[in-house]
Image (cartoon, grey):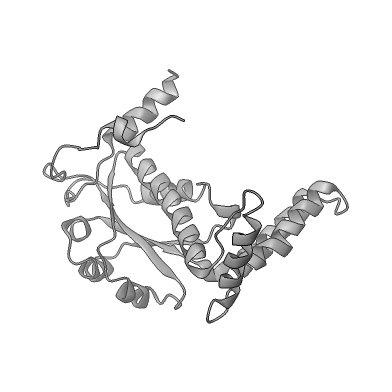
C-alpha cells in the first residue's frame, strides 16, 4: 500500500462526527477556508457546481444558526458552522461559464471535441435543468425516457425531483471533501440535517429555489465530543461483487 494511502486511511479512520467542541483550544479559521477550497474540487454532475458555502463565524450569527439547528451541541459549541447550499436555480449562470470555458479549451469551434462540448452545454444542459411551474416538461421527459429505455439503456431522470437529488448529491460530495480536509487539518466536524432550513434560508437571505443541504459544525473536539464507539453494519452485508 502506498504511503499516501496509509495517510488517507488514517484520516478516514480518525474522522468521526464530533458533537461537542473545545471552546478554549486554538482554532485556525483559515483551515475552514482551505477546506472549503478543497471541497469545491469534488466531482459534481456535469461540472455545473450548483453549490454555495456560507461560513457562520460571528458569535451572534453562531448563536442564531445554532438555535435554528435545534440547539444541538454540535451546533452550539462549534467554532464555525458551514452551511452547504444547493443552487439548482443558478444553472443558467453556470452554463454560461462552462460554455465560455469550452470556447477557451477548444479554440477550433469546428473540431469534433468542440462541437461535442458545445452541444452538451448549449443544447442538452438546458433541456435537463429547465423546468416549468407544473413540471410538465419533466413529466414529458420521463415518458420519453421510459419508451426510449425499452430499446436500450437510458438515463431516466429529468423531472424537478431528479434535478434536486442530483444537486444535493453533488453538494454532499463537496461536503465530504470539506470534512475530510478538516480532519487532515487536525480538526473535527459534524454534518447536521436536523435544522429549520426555512429560517436558515431567511437568515442568509437566500432565494426561494435555493436549498440548504446540511449544516456542518467544526472545531477542535472536546474530550467528551464523541458520544460512542464507531458502529458499522458488517461489510458482507453491504459490499457485494458481481
> Where 217 sits versus 158, above or below?
above
Residue drawn where x is 37% and y is 74% of the image: 201
User: Viewed as shown, does residue 121 lie left or right of 48?
Assistant: right
Residue drawn where x is 30% and y is 35% of the image: 237
Quarter of the image where the N terminus is located: top left
Could you say which is closer to the camera, residue 63 or residue 200? 200
Could you say which is closer to the camera, residue 139 or residue 219? 139
**Extreme-left residue of the structure:** 224
**Extreme-bottom residue of the structure:** 133
Location of residue 206 by image quarter:
bottom left
**Extreme-top residue of the structure:** 1
**x%, y% of residue 145?**
61, 61
Residue drawn where x is 57% and y is 58% of the image: 156
All told, the count of numbered labels is 0
> Where 121 sits versus 30, above or below?
below
> Where 29 sits versus 8, above or below?
below
User: Viewed as shown, does residue 156 lie left or right of 5?
Assistant: right
> Where 66 sits versus 151, above or below?
below
**x%, y% of residue 44?**
53, 51
**x%, y% of residue 151?**
66, 52
**Extreme-right residue of the structure:** 110
**x%, y% of residue 99?**
72, 60
Location of residue 228 by image quarter:
top left
Residue drawn where x is 37% and y is 26% of the image: 7
Could you say which is closer to the camera, residue 201 or residue 37? 201
Amino acid at each position: 500500500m502506498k504511503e499516501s494511502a496509509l495517510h488517507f486511511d488514517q484520516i478516514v479512520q480518525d474522522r468521526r462526527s464530533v458533537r461537542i467542541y473545545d471552546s478554549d483550544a486554538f482554532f485556525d479559521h483559515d483551515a475552514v477556508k482551505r477546506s472549503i477550497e478543497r471541497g469545491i474540487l469534488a466531482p459534481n454532475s456535469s461540472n455545473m457546481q450548483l453549490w454555495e458555502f456560507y461560513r457562520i463565524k460571528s458569535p451572534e450569527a453562531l448563536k442564531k444558526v445554532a438555535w435554528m439547528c435545534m440547539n444541538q451541541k454540535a451546533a452550539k459549541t462549534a467554532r464555525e458552522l458551514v452551511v452547504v447550499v444547493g443552487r439548482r436555480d443558478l444553472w443558467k449562470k453556470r452554463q454560461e461559464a462552462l460554455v465560455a470555458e469550452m470556447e477557451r479549451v477548444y479554440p477550433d469551434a469546428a473540431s469534433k471535441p468542440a462541437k461535442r462540448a458545445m452541444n452538451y452545454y448549449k443544447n442538452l444542459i438546458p433541456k435537463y435543468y429547465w423546468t416549468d411551474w407544473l413540471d410538465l416538461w419533466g413529466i414529458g421527459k420521463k415518458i420519453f425516457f421510459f419508451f426510449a429505455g425499452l430499446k436500450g439503456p437510458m438515463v431516466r431522470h429529468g423531472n424537478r425531483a431528479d434535478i434536486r437529488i442530483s444537486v444535493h448529491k453533488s453538494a454532499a460530495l463537496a461536503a465530504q471533501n470539506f470534512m475530510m480536509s478538516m480532519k487532515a487539518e487536525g480538526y473535527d466536524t459534524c454534518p447536521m440535517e436536523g435544522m429549520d432550513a426555512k429560517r436558515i434560508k431567511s437568515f442568509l437571505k437566500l432565494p426561494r429555489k435555493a436549498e440548504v443541504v446540511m449544516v456542518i459544525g467544526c472545531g477542535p473536539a472536546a474530550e467528551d465530543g464523541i458520544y460512542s464507539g464507531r458502529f458499522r453494519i458488517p461489510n458482507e452485508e453491504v459490499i457485494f461483487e458481481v
